[in-house]
Amino acid sequence: MAQSTIRFAAININHNHIYGMARLLLRAGAEFVSFYAPEPELVAEFQPAFPQARLAASAQEILDDPTIQMILTSGIASERAPLGIQAMRHGKDFMSDKPGFTSLEQLAEARRVQAETQRIYSICFSERLEVRAAVQAGELIHAGAIGKVIQTVGLGPHRVNPPVRPAWFYQREKYGGILADIGSHQVEQFLYYTGSTRAEVVTSQVANWHHPEFPGLEDFGDMVLRSDHATGYIRVDWFTPQGLGMWGDGRMTILGTDGYIELRKYIDLAGRPGGEHLFLVNQKDIQYLDCSQHDLPYGRNLIADVLHRTETAMPQAHVFLASQLALEAEAKAQRLGNLK
């Protein structure tokens, strides 16, 4: 009988995105077998949320388990790619929290090992894959709702909240820089919504404008991207004010030749409750769509890809290109404010 689902494990759970990553696979019917984390305080919080998953004695125990097909991680960002390379060499597919890489050298090695092993190196770009409005926007675009997409404007504000952030969050060599980190979400969306398979970084800049006590923190960054048929502007920051009542007012405007879409992913300042808001303007009218019940296919598509060696969840080349552009933007960025 053909296998209908997969067994997965998690190694390193330093960012709480791991909860959503595990749940999206569980929601699609996967089996959560085991996990490993060296920090007792993280284990104590994680284990009650996923009682079906056994605490492994070591990461190596999970890597050596032949029944586990996929490994998840939200470890310290600079440690994700080395783990992914290990996982692929152990014959396992891999899903990383973003960023999946903190240097172009890591990316080059992962590309080499992925080509050699033919394993999946997926990155959970949750700001599109796990946002219902973002998924529905893609379907509308592919159906021709706004014509040919010629530009995206992606805004990714976040709240810094220093008391709850670990030390590595403030160390650029560990988190990768703001454009490589949260900027990678916006780069991925630019490529996806414009249908671009090649692109370049036109200009980029990063700054520490307001946190001199954390000299390694980049609290602002922006960039301009260009493909052969579209452009994109991206701004990310750590300046969400406490009064918003939400960690960030994530927005995406997608300009087409026959209309535009604006996503208010997490909050509508006009007063509609919750998130998942989509506004569509075309040659006929203005439409508002509540996307809160829309389907999220990433988890089940990824399971199918593991079982059938396909690329329905996200092409591997797309994963690597989104990461490459974010890393190049970070590497070439002009450094402003309190940055050295």
Image (tube, rainbow, N blue to C red):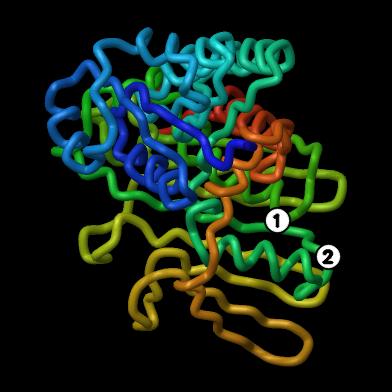
Pick the front one: 260 or 111: 111
Kindly give the residue lying farthest to the bottom in the view shown: 285
Res 253 label: none
Q: Which residue is mark 2?
A: 148
**Disc 1 to disc 2, C-alpha distance:** 10 Å
Q: Which residue is mark 1?
A: 193
Measured along the vertical axis of the image, is residue 234 above or below residue 326? Answer: below
Residue 192 screen position, x and y as percent:
70, 50
- Label 2: state its secondary structure: loop
Pick the front one: 220 or 312: 312
Q: Is residue 206 left or right of residue 246?
A: right
User: Is any atom of residue 338 visible in this view?
Assistant: no
Residue in view at x 41 percent, y 38 percent: 31
Residue in view at x 78 percent, y 60 percent: 150
Residue 20 screen position, x and y as percent:
37, 46
| Image-quadrant location for residue 267 | bottom left
Residue 50 screen position, x and y as percent:
25, 40
| Image-quadrant location for residue 269 | bottom left
Asked if disc 1 and disc 2 are in contact, CB closer than 8 Å, the reply is no
Q: Is residue 212 left or right of residue 253?
A: left
